Image (cartoon, rainbow, N blue to C red):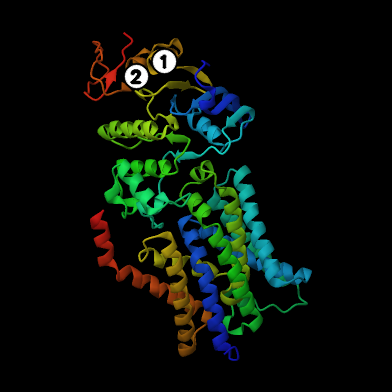
Amino acid sequence: MFDDFFSRALIAGIGLALITGPLGCFIVWRRMAYFGDTMAHSALLGVALSFLLNINLTLGVFVVAATVAVALLLLQRRNNLSTDALLGILSHSTLAIGLVIVAFMTWVRVDLMGFLFGDILAVSVWDIALIYGGGIAIVGALAMMWRPLLAATVNAELAEAEGLRPEVSRVVFMLLLASVIAIAMKLVGVLLITSLLIIPAATARRLSGTPEQMAVIAALLGALAVAGGLFGSLHYDTPSGPSIVVAALGLFLLSILVPVQLWRKRRGKA
Amino acid sequence: MDARATHDIIATMAGVGVRRGGRWLVEGIDLTIRRGEIVTLIGPNGSGKSTTAKLLTGVLKPDAGTVHRLEGLRVGYVPQQLSIDWTLPLSVKRLMNLTARHSADEIAAALSAVGIAHLANDDVQHLSGGEFQRALLARAMIRKPDLLVLDEPVQGVDFSGEVALYDLIKQIRDETHCGVLLISHDLHVVMAETDTVICLNGHVCCRGNPESVARSPEYLQLFGTRAAATLAIYQHHHDHEHGADGHVHAHPEHSHDHVH
């Protein structure tokens, strides 16, 4: 089944959605959507530097995304600019520097469109191994630090006063996010990665009663969106990455319409 | 310090200070908490009440002085102004397991102890101010803490709710015999069972039992005689004296300690 490109894309995309679902819940809960976007945009700088220094692409993207996260933490401590403005600066300047460096490197041919919007139909068996191997590590790490991270999401001081270590879990979470971006970039591209983190999680909210349920439902909805998007792109001959995002959006809109009754009932009870 | 069992001491601070941006936020704070003791911090905004609480729990490290906590001290914490985002689906029951796992029996017992057993399956976002504070108290006490730190626990709760919450805190203290550090949101209100009131203004202005603090010259200087006249002390005995002062409004549930 790994033989044809469509099956490979489907398996890779579903694997990715199973990682981004739970991770994306924390992005939504912690209001880090723009932060995720910034890290994703910096991935292009990672691509450019990987070509320039001739290092592994996934590693290069991971290092740059993690560095941007650390840079933001440091800037937040000393600078007077709001986080919002800092993110805007980091997000677009890393993307722009990446594009400028790529333009300078006349000796390499870089498929920019592939990195901006992804090329899920070009995934190799090696990519699939990376997604599932990395995915198990990422989801495993997230499960291990689930309680401290969730407690810190509710209130960092509370978590710390009661003996958990919110700073550590926060740094680990950023590293996990950088890894997901490094893994996902090839598939959906730097401009669309955040949508796989945010849209399934936002869709899952109305259908979930506990944080754990929301993580699982987000993973499943993401997988559904990948499958729907890929079949749609095959059928209508549309670009695969954007088709997946459109499918995810469709599920989100459906979630707003369908469980209204259910939602009203719950609100009425309280 | 008197000779009251030193082995009952669960946390001490000696000469503690925190410096930020070349300015001392708090300085020279001495504080002792024993098992079963309620210590209340009062003081104006920015006087370092929350900072002192954070020093005691270890969230903040002191720049001067020392903080000693009992080895393996178990802390239950009710933070100030906790708001939980709507995007996080969190029932009252799930909130109980936030920092550690507890059995269903323990959760049921903790929720009935604070009188909200019927809300176990409700989302925390749908609770009223008083119900939410009760849920937070239940969450802090389910840990069987040695030290309960309550940062403005009656904030956003109406008057009768306040009295009921203070009752609840007293009851938790009596049953679990934990030490309590309570930060009061109101300069003029101190719960009657408080053993020690510490009045802060960057440093310890005065301390003592509620009655003596209300009469101390430092308190009067800091808040003026009008404020001191309205230092209300919640208690459930009605055998209090009423002065002719018009600043206080009478309520059968609490008494006023008048200086005039």
**Quadrant in which the N terminus of chain A is drawn:** bottom right
The residue under label 2 is B231
**Considering the numbered disc 1 on the image, is that residue within a helix, a strand or a loop?**
helix
Other-residue count near label 1 (Cα within 10 Å), few / some / many at <14 / 14–19 / ≥20 = many
B61, above or below A92, in the image: above
Mark 1, chain letter?
A: B
Q: Nearer the viewer, residue B233 or A90?
A: B233
Residue B250 placement (x, y as % from top left)? 22, 21
**Marks 1 and 2, Cα distance to the nearest angstrom?**
9 Å
The residue under label 1 is B213
Examine the rendering and report whether any part of residue A203 can be seen: yes
> Image point 59% across, 60% down: which residue?
A91
* Quadrant of the rendered image containing residue B21: top right
> Image point 54% across, 78% down: which residue?
A13
Q: Earlier in the sequence, mark 1 or mark 2?
A: 1
Total numbered circles: 2
- For residue A91, side relative to residue B117 (left or right): right
Examine the rendering and report whether any part of residue B129 can be seen: no
* Quadrant of the rendered image containing residue A132: bottom right
